[in-house]
Every structure is written in structure tokens, then in C-alpha cells.
Image (spheres, rainbow, N blue to C red):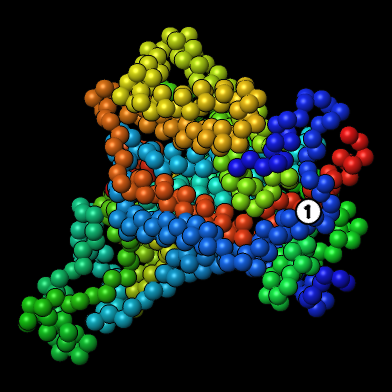
């Protein structure tokens, strides 16, 4: 999976005057167009059996998800393992898992944009797309978990003859607003950024249908100065609006737990700890997806090893925060003097779910620490493997938090060990089908790298080294 | 302009689209809220009955008490529909050859009950109890309207959850002395004072407002 560009970076000395460019290979405006649009246009020139194989597999898994959801709705949530006392089983675990992954997109597109981090341009489109698709997967779980999905609109404060309103004091309602706001803003942000690139696709289109479709979605973009002026203003405003969302969404998700009074959930550390974990998992997913895509489509000179290395540093930083939070939870449990709190954490690490706890610790705390070594940060296979470990670890983190606290609460008489059913597993696997189906369509039909933004940094690297 | 492959008028459509989408959303919510409300769909329901029984004549002109026929309202959850026997208490002596009463006499002879059509029908997941209301001084008229003026009974009130809650939140607006429950013409001189007094009597009137299980068991 390594290329000549990767080697160039690996052999470059740590000398600020000869730092490798963000975009390598002597790229020009025209070559960027060809390289990025070429990914989508390549499918027109040559039938890609690999794409069809992957798409076929993804959409089959998605169809399986559809069947499971139909069975779920017609039968009831009893097909899952959610059972007293663990009424929040895998559905909420999967929800938090996917929402967490969705955090990399806005962080890269909004916060790094405001901080003028030029390296974001190579991966922001990709990460934003991942965000939207992950939010779709996340939104699915609470929706199908409500039981009576035909009245799911009760989640929203719509005037009705019952004069019945959602409970505004419940963090579950805040969650509805937080996630739907996040989905809306992310989608707008993503689409806004796509407009100039869609116009590029339109102008390069060779068939009428392709031209018409891209023309429709590029909203008449001509690239005039007035268009650019307004575009950049709007982009800045959206970046400003999206920035607080990076912090607020997972904060509100953590309130689902922290506002309740269950030992192991009722802690003030949850909001920052959840946000760090979300960024951690989101960046890991960016690596997991980006590494194969850049290799398959020959984009190593645009998404360089330097980009991957920066992402790995973010993973190292947020992974350390997560590790610190795990340790701090134990400290606070001990320091609080509360026997229930102390029991909850001893039980987490050494109780019946110790296996899950230690998988979580190995994947989330130990594996990112390997990124202290430059050799591993610059090794594409190592980056890929560790990113997958982080994905696994973050799923287990949500499992550990949700299930261990619920399965053993105040009353030993109501303790029980959580048993997932095959349908729990099928729903989780199915959500990956949804994710990858959307993702493969994205690769095939949309610019996977922000062409216009990459062009914006090209001149910078020419003028000063 | 270069790149624009659509005719100029499409820009207008594009500019109007957000308005149409926003307005459309608002329209749907408004339509569903008011159009699907029982206020629109259920009020005025007036099915034809198998017997041309007139409440206006019996309860209004003749002054029969509601409880003569609907005799379970003070003890039971449901207001009984009278059996043919109740009709025949009078009608085996009065108007024994009336054409309109032929179905009643048929029922009496065959023992086959008259199949009345239910007018006031709550959903099965609501547990409404007549005795809880009648014995605390909620008049029949509050929910059923002026039955004593109807030849054919029609639904006057929406019977929606919001409508129930209007009273449950402010019971003093409708409470009356228990002796006047079936009196359709009764009106308080000062409902505010009387209602407050009655609501405070006998440990107070506390209809379920916040607990779902008060009505949905």
C-alpha cells in the first residue's frame, strides 16, 4: 500500500526548509481535476468488477438490514436481547458508536477550517461524507428502538389533538434535537462545499444525463467572482455554526447517561470524555476508509503520508484523553466514597464483563500509544491496523458503559447477565451495509476530494518553501 | 453563461424551491393538526338508528331522567344501552300500534336485541369511567351536548385527548351539584365560586393530568 510519495516522506529529514509539500507530484490545477474527477469518470471508461462486487455485498447486507427492520417492526423489540434489567442494549451502543464516528467530519471541516489548517483540504470532503453516512446509521437505531415506529413523530414537538408534548426535561429529547441539528448542518456544509466541484464534473461531463444531473445539483455555478465571494462568506458562516456542534452533540449524547442516577453513568466527566472519544473514533474511521481508497485510486500524492501522520497524531492525543478519562473514573469512584459507585467500577474491570472492559482498554488506551513511534506513524499497514483496533475498542467502550452499569445496579436481586440475540448482531452488521452502500455510491458519483480547496493551497506551496 | 445548460426560467424555480419546501412542511403540519383532528373528523357524527327514537321527545318534552334508561352511569364505567324491556315498560300500553315502534315490538317478540349504532365511541386504549364523572358532579351535557334537543343523537364534542385534558386541568369550570348532573338546562349563578367550592369538597377533585396510567391502563 505504500507508494513513491510515501517513501519520499519517510526519507525526508525533519528539516523545515525542505518539508514535503501537502500536495506532491508537481500537481497543477489541471492535474488535480484529472486525478479527482478521474476517480468517478474512471467508472465510465472501464467496468470495475471490484466496485460491483463490493457494492453487491454492501447492498445485500443493507437488504438484510431491511428484512431485520421489517421483522423488528412487525414483531417488536423483543427480538433483541434487551431484557430486564438491561433495557438499553446494543441499539443504544450502536447509536453512540455511529454518532461518535460522525464527529471527525465537522471537526475537520469546521474547526480546522477556522484554524486555517491547510492539510484538512485533502481529507475534508471524505470525512464530511463519512459523517453524513454515519449519522444516517446512528439515526436508524433510536428510530427503530422506539417500538412503535409509526408514532415516531411524537419525538418532535408537533401540535396535536392530544395536547401531548415530548418531555422537555429529558436528555433523550435533547438528543433528538442535537442529532437532527447536526445532521442538517453537516449535510448543508457538505453540499455547499460540493457545489464548485459538481460544476467541474458538469463541465467535464461527456454524456447528456451526467451533465444534466451535475448541472442540476451545482445550482448554476459558473465560478464568477460574485459566486466565489458569496460562497466563501457562506462557508465561513456555516463553519462558525458547525463549530459548537462538534462539542454539543456528543455532550448531549453523554447526557443520556450522565443525567440518570445510575452508578457508572452519573458522572460529570462524561461530556468531555465522550467528545474526546467521538473525535478519537471518527479519526480512526477516516484512516480505515482513506487508506484503501487512496491506494486503489492512486491518490497518494494528494492524501499523502503526511496527512495520515497528522491524523494519527490526533488519534494519539484523543486516545490519551480517553485513557485519562478511564483512569479518572476510577479515581473519582474511589474518592467519592460512594460504595455503589465504587462497586460499579470494580465490577466493570473485574466483574462478568471484564473481558469487554479489557478489550476496550487494549484497543483504546494501549494501541494508540504506539503512535509515539514515528516508524509506526509513517507505516501505512500499521496505521490501518491500529485504526481498526480503535474502531473495535470504541464500540466496546459504549458496550461497557451501557451494559455493565445496567446489568448490576443497586438491587442485587435484579442483576442479570445481558445476552444479545442473533438479531442484535444482524442489525449492527446491517448498519455497516447501509454505511458502505452510501459510501460506495459517493466514491462512484461525487468528487471524493475537495478539488477547489486543494487548488487554493497549491499556490501557497509554490511561493514559499 | 458558460456552464448553465438550463433555460433562464429555471433559476426562478430554484429560488422558489426553499420557500415551497418550507411552506409545504408548514402546510402538512397544519393540515394534519387541524384536518386529522377529531374536532374535524368526529364532531357531527350522526348515524341513522334502527329505531326512530327521539331524545328530544323523551328526555326533553316528556322530561324522562337520563338514568331511567342509562341506569348504570352512577355505578359502572359504561352507560348502559337500555334493553327492549325498558322500552316495553311503557310501550306495551302506549302507542301499541305505532308504525315507528314496529322494530321494538319485533325485538320484544323474537328476543333479538335492537342493534343501536354507537355514537360516542372512545378508543379501546382509553378507560373512561362514567361513575367517576357523574358522582363527582360532571353533567351529562358537558360531554354529550343538548341531547334533550336532538331527534337523532349526534356527537357534539371532539372527545379527543386534548379536549379531555382541558377539563382535567380545570375541573372547577364544569363542576355542578351532583343533584343537577342530569339537568340539561341547569346553569350556575357564579360558576367560578361554586366550582372552586365543589372542587375543594370531600378531599378535593384530582383528575389524572400528568399520569398516563390514569386513563391508559
- Camera-side residue of A114 and A147: A114
Residue A260 x, y percent position in the rendering: 45, 29
Residue at numbered disc 1: A32
- Camera-side residue of A267 and A356: A356
Q: Residue at x 29, y 59 (%)?
A: B124
Residue A184 x, y percent position in the rendering: 64, 51
Q: Residue at x 63, y 29 (%)?
A: A377
Q: Secondary structure at mark 1?
A: helix
Quarter of image, res A87: top left
- Camera-side residue of A310 and B201: A310
- In the image, residue A44 above or below residue B132: below
What count of labels does the image hold? 1
Q: Residue at x 27, y 74 (%)?
A: B117
Residue B191 appears in the figure: no
Host chain of mark 1: A
- In the image, residue B108 above or below residue A273: below
- In the image, residue B52 above or below residue B157: below
Q: Name the image quarter holding the N terminus of chain A.
A: top right
Residue A431 x, y percent position in the rendering: 46, 50
Q: Is residue B84 left or right of residue A98?
A: left
Amino acid at each position: 500500500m505504500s507508494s513513491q510519495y510515501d517513501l519520499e516522506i519517510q526519507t525526508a529529514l525533519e528539516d523545515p526548509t525542505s518539508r514535503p509539500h501537502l500536495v506532491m507530484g508537481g500537481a497543477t490545477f489541471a492535474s488535480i481535476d484529472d486525478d479527482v474527477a478521474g476517480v468517478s469518470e474512471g467508472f465510465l471508461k472501464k467496468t470495475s468488477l471490484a466496485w460491483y462486487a463490493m457494492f453487491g455485498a454492501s447492498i445485500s447486507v443493507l437488504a438484510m438490514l431491511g428484512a431485520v427492520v421489517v421483522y423488528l417492526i412487525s414483531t417488536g423489540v423483543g427480538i433483541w436481547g434487551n431484557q430486564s434489567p438491561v433495557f438499553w442494549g446494543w441499539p443504544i451502543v450502536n447509536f453512540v458508536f455511529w454518532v461518535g464516528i460522525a464527529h471527525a467530519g465537522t471537526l475537520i471541516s469546521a474547526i480546522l477550517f477556522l484554524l486555517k489548517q491547510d492539510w484538512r483540504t485533502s481529507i475534508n470532503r471524505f470525512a464530511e461524507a463519512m459523517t453524513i453516512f454515519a449519522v444516517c446509521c446512528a439515526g436508524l437505531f433510536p428510530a427503530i428502538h422506539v417500538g412503535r415506529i409509526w408514532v415516531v413523530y411524537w419525538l418532535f414537538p408537533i401540535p396535536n389533538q392530544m395536547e401531548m408534548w415530548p418531555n422537555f426535561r429529558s436528555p433523550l429529547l435533547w438528543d433528538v434535537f442535537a442529532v437532527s441539528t447536526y445532521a442538517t448542518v453537516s449535510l448543508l456544509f457538505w453540499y455547499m462545499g460540493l457545489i464548485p466541484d459538481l460544476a467541474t464534473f458538469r463541465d467535464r461531463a461527456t454524456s447528456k444525463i451526467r451533465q444534466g444531473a451535475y448541472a442540476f445539483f451545482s445550482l448554476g455555478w459558473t465560478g464568477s467572482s460574485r459566486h466565489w465571494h458569496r460562497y466563501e462568506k457562506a462557508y465561513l458562516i456555516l463553519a462558525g455554526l458547525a463549530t459548537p456542534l462538534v462539542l454539543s452533540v456528543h455532550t448531549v449524547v453523554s447526557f443520556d447517561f450522565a443525567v440518570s442516577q445510575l452508578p457508572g453513568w452519573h458522572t460529570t466527566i462524561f461530556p468531555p470524555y465522550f467528545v474526546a472519544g467521538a473525535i478519537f473514533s471518527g479519526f480512526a474511521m477516516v484512516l480505515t476508509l482513506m487508506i484503501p481508497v487512496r491506494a486503489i485510486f492512486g491518490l497518494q500524492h494528494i492524501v499523502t503520508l503526511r496527512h495520515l501522520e497528522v491524523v494519527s497524531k490526533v488519534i494519539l492525543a484523543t486516545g490519551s484523553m480517553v485513557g485519562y478519562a478511564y483512569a479518572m473514573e476510577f479515581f473519582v469512584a474511589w474518592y467519592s466514597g460512594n460504595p455503589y459507585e465504587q462497586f460499579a467500577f470494580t465490577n466493570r474491570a473485574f466483574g462478568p464483563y471484564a473481558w469487554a472492559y479489557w478489550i476496550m482498554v487494549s484497543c483504546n488506551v494501549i494501541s494508540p500509544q504506539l503512535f509515539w513511534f514515528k516508524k509506526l506513524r509513517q507505516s501505512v499497514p500499521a496505521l490501518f491496523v491500529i485504526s481498526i483496533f480503535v474502531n473495535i475498542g470504541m464500540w466496546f467502550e459504549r458496550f461497557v458503559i451501557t451494559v455493565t452499569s445496567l446489568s448490576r445496579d443497586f438491587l442485587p436481586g435484579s442483576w442479570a447477565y445481558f445476552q444479545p440475540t442473533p438479531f442484535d448482531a444482524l442489525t449492527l452488521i446491517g448498519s455497516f451495509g447501509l454505511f458502505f452502500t452510501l459510501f460506495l455510491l459517493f466514491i462512484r458519483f461525487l468528487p471524493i476530494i475537495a478539488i477547489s480547496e486543494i487548488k487554493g493551497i497549491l499556490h501557497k506551496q509554490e511561493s514559499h518553501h | 453563461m458558460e456552464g448553465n445548460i438550463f433555460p433562464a426560467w429555471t433559476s426562478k424555480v430554484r429560488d422558489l424551491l426553499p420557500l415551497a419546501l418550507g411552506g409545504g412542511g408548514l402546510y402538512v403540519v397544519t393540515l394534519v393538526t387541524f384536518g386529522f383532528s377529531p374536532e374535524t373528523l368526529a364532531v357531527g357524527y350522526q348515524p341513522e338508528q334502527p329505531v326512530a327514537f327521539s331524545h328530544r321527545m323523551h328526555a326533553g318534552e316528556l322530561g324522562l331522567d337520563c338514568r331511567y334508561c342509562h341506569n348504570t352511569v352512577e355505578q359502572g364505567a359504561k352507560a348502559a344501552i337500555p334493553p327492549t324491556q325498558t322500552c316495553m315498560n311503557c310501550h306495551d300500553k302506549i302507542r301499541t300500534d305505532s308504525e315507528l315502534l314496529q322494530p321494538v315490538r319485533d325485538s320484544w317478540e323474537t328476543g333479538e336485541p335492537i342493534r343501536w349504532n354507537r355514537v360516542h365511541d372512545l378508543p379501546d386504549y382509553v378507560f373512561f369511567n362514567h361513575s367517576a364523572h357523574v358522582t363527582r358532579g360532571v353533567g351529562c351535557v358537558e360531554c354529550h351536548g343538548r341531547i334533550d334537543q336532538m331527534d337523532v343523537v349526534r356527537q357534539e364534542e371532539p372527545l379527543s385527548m386534548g379536549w379531555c385534558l382541558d377539563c382535567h386541568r380545570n375541573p372547577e369550570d364544569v363542576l355542578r351539584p351532583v343533584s343537577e348532573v342530569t339537568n340539561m338546562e341547569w346553569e350556575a349563578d357564579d360558576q367560578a365560586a361554586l366550582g372552586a367550592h365543589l372542587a375543594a369538597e370531600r378531599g378535593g377533585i384530582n383528575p389524572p393530568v400528568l399520569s398516563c396510567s390514569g386513563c391508559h391502563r
